[in-house]
Image (cartoon, helix red, strand yellow):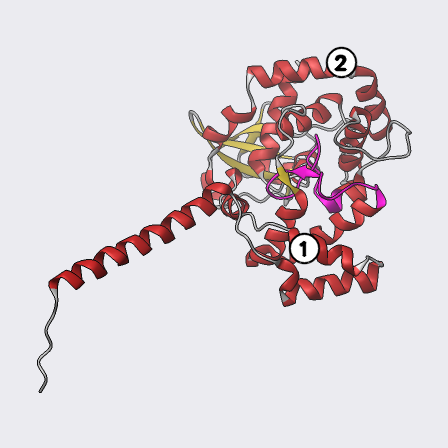
Amino acid sequence: MKKIIINPTKIKLYKKLSTTICAGLMLSFSFNLHAGFSQTNYAQRADVKSFINEMVDQHDFDRAYLEKKFSEAKRLDNVLESIAKPAEKRLTWKRYRPIFVTNNRSSKGITFIEQHKKILERAEKEYGVPVEIIAAIIGVETYYGKHTGKYTVFDSLTTLGFDYPPRSSFFKSELKHFLLLSKEENIDVDTMTGSYAGAMGMPQFISSSYRNYAVDFDGDGKRDLWNSIDDVIGSVANYFHRHGWKEGESITHLAQVTDTSIVRKKNTLKPYATVGQFSKQGVKTDSKLNEDQRASLLKFEGKNGDEYWLGLKNFYVITRYNHSELYAMAVFQLSEKLKN
């Protein structure tokens, strides 16, 4: 048998080379994560080609235009990271409330109402949605236009539609709506920015909502949720109106619960029992409510312990804007500060 002689010098060289290669790979990975995107040519992928075929065949898009756009699209790694851990799923009410229900935000909201009082009142009269609710939505969403999002919507929706399997179908649908919206409103897809999930403008409408609920409230022939305050206010009011807002009715009431076993382990957003039924189970509020009204009994982990609330139909309507009880409660409590 031939004897194998191991050269210690070569071993050290191999170890050094291996360490250098690993370090280089980690540096490259770190750079991509830090930069926020990875290079990929979406236009070459089979699933993207199928999507392009659909847009060409069903919606008369130019194939060369779409192929060019998808070949230039960036895969945004930071978008994939953000979508996996939204604040509504990882924060309790105790931590969520101080972010949105603040003196600074309410002060900004009062100024916003003073500046746009006529438009807000016109929207309330036409759609039945209170001035303070419209203002609170805009305040929670973008701090009255200060934070509308820095991501290119086309890149975000492409990334989520083709590289985020848990909600791929939803984001592909939003990408389709986005492209149709760009054609309808004559907007350049390269300049449209928004949140990491593709929400746009001061009210943060996703593409399907923009197409279905945005209104031309200033009468200039265009629905502009970036630059027209009239359109923003009218569109938010129309959104709530179309989702069944009950004019003149309350939203939610703090409740006292004697038997906590009746509280569901997970909050149910849609009202599932009448106020009278809850009353018979020992649920009480400081307000006199119509016993035939339907409500949902909600539990929140508050600063001073568990809180219980009866969420009525209008509370549920707020969750149609964002499917989170934390979000709806923040909008409600901010609106109360704006009203008072």
Write down the residue under mark 1. 70
Q: Position of residue 232 (x, y in %)?
A: 77, 29
Q: Secondary structure at mark 2?
A: helix
Nearest to the observer: residue 86 or residue 239: 86
Residue at x 46%, y 29% (from the top left corner) = 94
Residue span colored magenta:
184-209
Dominant secondary structure, magenta: loop
Q: Amino acid at mark 1?
A: Phe
Residue at x 82%, y 20% (from the top left corner) = 119
| Residue 265, above or below 111 | below
Residue at x 55%, y 53% (from the top left corner) = 39
**First in sequence: mark 2 vs mark 1:** 1
| Residue 275, above or below 132 | below
Nearest to the observer: residue 319 or residue 305: 319
Write down the residue under mark 2. 115
Q: Nearer the viewer, mark 2 or mark 1?
A: 1
Q: Position of residue 208 (x, y in %)?
A: 75, 47
In the picture, the quarter occupied by the C terminus is: top right
Q: Position of residue 92 (x, y in %)?
A: 46, 35
Left or right, 1 with respect to 188, comes to left
Q: Amino acid at mark 2?
A: Gln
